[in-house]
Image (cartoon, grey):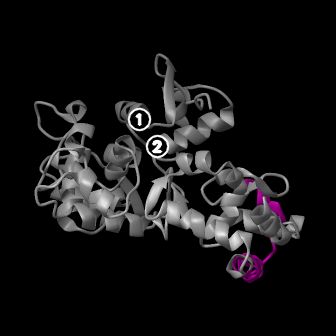
């Protein structure tokens, strides 16, 4: 493919030392990249930034020149805008997964992280980026006026199947069924408007439901110490911290400070010190399952046995393999 040949004319000149720096952005969503490249990185942040800026400049200049690469990138952007599932894009354009830097740096990584062609995150690819696609979605469905959500989104340029639209609307903070997608409506339910059956109890909403409602009303991130006194029921600090970290509706915006994931703000890059995530690291270091009591004895902060059990059961990285014994979930078949 001529477009890939143009791209490889730039990427093929990358040295092994440069790749160690570039991997920080090429694999920004994979922690293994940092472990792999840490010992090879240049000594100063300024040197790393210079390498990244120089490579990005070369890629963008190549894309800007008239030729097959520019035409290909223009076609990709036109097909994506504003957003489509990433798996579908790769299925339609398998050449995006072709390695353009030895040994296995795919073309899409270079185009996304250094070419500015699109953004890839959370299983979606968007033009120009995910926050803009979320904003466009919310703007489109804000006033349905008795029209169908599917029709309104199609008119706004969204080219997805009903199944994909339902998943995307969920990513944007709405809960809608495939049937509702094709029914005339005036509004869509926000996720906070409904409590899943699994979270209903005789005592009312769960702790995480209450926090989600509080953050929605606040409209801004809150520290855990601000959250606790404003809830209608009393909760222990440690277990609530673990529950919030395990619930996909929340992200940490700063240490012990939580925001709604639907706000699309930048997550705090610092280490997650929740008991469940510490447990996952202990199990990974052990190379096999650990009993609840073994995990609890090795944590750097005290937690009740029941609180730790609840945190481990709620964490989507862990699985119970025997009574009170936990291991890391294994990835499913490709």
Question: In the image, which disc is placed on residue 275?
Answer: 2
- Please report the residue visible at 81 percent of the width from the left and 73 percent of the height from the top: 42
Q: Earlier in the sequence, mark 1 or mark 2?
A: 2
52 shown above or below 7: below
Main secondary structure along the magenta-highlighted residues? helix
Dividing the picture into quadrants, the one containing residue 182 is top left
Q: Residue at x 37, y 51 (%)?
A: 168
Residue 47 pos. (x, y %): 78, 81
**In this figure, which residue is indicated by the disc labeled 1?**
308
218 vs 10, left or right, is left
Observer-nearest of 7 and 290:
7
Q: In this picture, is 186 found above or below 196?
A: below
Furthest residue toward top: 323
The magenta-colored residue range is: 35-61
114, 202: nearer the viewer = 114
Q: Quadrant of the C terminus?
A: top right
Q: CA distance from mark 1 to mark 2?
A: 7 Å
Horizontally, residue 292 falls left or right of residue 227, namely: right
- Residue sitting nearer the eye, 166 or 190: 166
Residue 66, x across and y down, in percent: 71, 80
Which residue shows up at 86% across the image and 66% down it?
Answer: 12
For the question of whether residue 307 can be seen, the reply is: yes
Instruction: Please report contact status of discs 1 and 2: CB closer than 8 Å, yes or no.
Output: yes
Q: Tell me the element at label 2.
A: helix
Q: Give coordinates of residue 326: x percent, y percent.
A: 52, 26
Along the viewing direction, whichever of 88 and 205 lies nearer the viewer: 88
Element carrying mark 1: helix
How far across and down, in percent of the image, does residue 156 sit? Answer: 32, 64
The reply to whether the magenta stretch includes residue 208 is no
The tally of labels here is 2
* Residues packed near mark 2 inside 10 Å, few (<14), some (14 to 19) or many (20 plus): many
Q: Residue at x 14, y 49 (%)?
A: 184
């Amino acid at each position: 493919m001529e477009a890939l040949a143009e791209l490889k004319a730039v990427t093929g000149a990358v040295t092994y030392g440069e790749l160690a720096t570039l991997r920080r952005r090429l694999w920004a969503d994979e922690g293994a990249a940092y472990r792999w490249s840490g010992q090879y990185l240049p000594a100063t942040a300024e040197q790393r930034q210079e390498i990244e800026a120089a490579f990005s400049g070369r890629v963008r200049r190549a894309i800007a020149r008239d030729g097959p690469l520019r035409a290909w990138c223009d076609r990709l952007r036109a097909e994506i805008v504003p957003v489509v599932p990433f798996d579908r894009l790769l299925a339609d354009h398998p050449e995006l997964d072709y390695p353009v830097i030895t040994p296995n740096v795919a073309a899409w990584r270079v185009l996304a992280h250094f070419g500015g062609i699109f953004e890839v995150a959370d299983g979606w690819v968007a033009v120009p980026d995910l926050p803009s696609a979320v904003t466009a979605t919310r703007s489109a469905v804000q006033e349905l006026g008795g029209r169908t959500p599917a029709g309104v989104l199609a008119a706004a340029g969204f080219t997805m199947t009903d199944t994909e639209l339902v998943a995307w609307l969920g990513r944007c903070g709405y809960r809608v069924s495939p049937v509702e997608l094709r029914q005339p409506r005036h509004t869509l339910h926000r996720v906070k408007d409904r409590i899943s059956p699994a979270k209903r109890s005789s005592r009312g909403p769960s702790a995480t439901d209450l926090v989600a409602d509080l953050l929605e009303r606040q409209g801004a991130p809150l520290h855990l110490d601000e959250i606790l006194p404003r809830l209608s029921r009393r909760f222990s600090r440690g277990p609530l911290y673990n529950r919030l970290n395990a619930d996909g509706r929340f992200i940490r915006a700063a240490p012990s400070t939580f925001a709604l994931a639907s706000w699309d703000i930048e997550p705090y890059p610092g280490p997650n010190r929740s008991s469940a995530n510490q447990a996952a690291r202990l199990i990974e270091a052990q190379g096999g399952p650990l009993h609840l009591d073994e995990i609890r004895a090795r944590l750097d902060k005290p937690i009740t046995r029941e609180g730790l059990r609840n945190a481990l059961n709620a964490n989507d990285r862990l699985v119970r393999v025997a009574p009170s014994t936990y291991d890391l979930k294994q990835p499913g078949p490709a």
